[in-house]
Image (cartoon, helix red, strand yellow):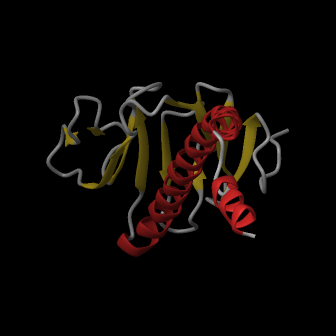
Amino acid sequence: MNRTATSRRRNLGFTLVELCVCVGIGAALLSQAIPSLGKMRQERTLRATSEALASDLRFARSEAARLGESVHFRISRKGAESCYVLHTGAANDCDCAGGQAVCKVPSSNIIKAEWLPAGKQMRLRSNAETLQFQHRQGLVTQTGSIELNLDSGAGIRQVVAITGRVRNCSTGVKLSGMSKCA
């Protein structure tokens, strides 16, 4: 009986081979998961930036109604490190391309300015440089779409209708929970 108890104590634990096999399997699984996690993080950043953009478009419409004057949504420096500014006054009075939001005319006022995060591999494109939200009906003159794209191909387009309403859809790679753009 004494020999059986001693041999059981020796068999408890892992052998070096078993430990190496487990570490190897874990490393293989982790090497497959890390790129997917990075892609998921980029897509979450894209969604968050896109939602902030849509929120600012809705904000421009509501500010036009609140202030009783037109509010302009102007995009500068398309591509990486681009920015947009919400302002009152004439259509091209204010700009944010120099790293700081400034207006050429003192009667124009900056409501808000935002820059795309530097180094996030994200691009901003638009078919309209300036959208004007009118204060009376809430309409937008020059409707347009603003697109945020990742270098990986995933993208979200914010479409601004003439009524000033904003809707979004995915471009390139289909994102879950979002309809594909036509």
The location of residue 149, given as percent across then percent down, is: 60, 32
The location of residue 172, given as percent across then percent down, is: 75, 31
175 and 111: which one is in front?
175
Does 32 sit above or below residue 89? above
Quadrant position of residue 9: bottom right
40 and 157: which one is in front?
40
Does 117 sit above or below residue 89? above
The answer to whether residue 50 is left or right of residue 88 is: right
Quadrant position of residue 126: top right
Does 150 sit above or below residue 134? above
The location of residue 144, given as percent across then percent down, is: 63, 41
Residue in view at x 61 percent, y 59 percent:
164
Residue furthest to the right: 182
The answer to whether residue 94 is left or right of residue 44 is: left
Quadrant location of the N terminus? bottom right
The location of residue 53, given as percent across then percent down, is: 50, 51
Quadrant location of the C terminus? top right
| Count of all numbered marks drawn on residues in the image | 0
Residue furthest to the left: 106
Residue in view at x 19 percent, y 52 percent:
107
Residue in view at x 44 percent, y 34 percent:
120
Quadrant position of residue 4: bottom right
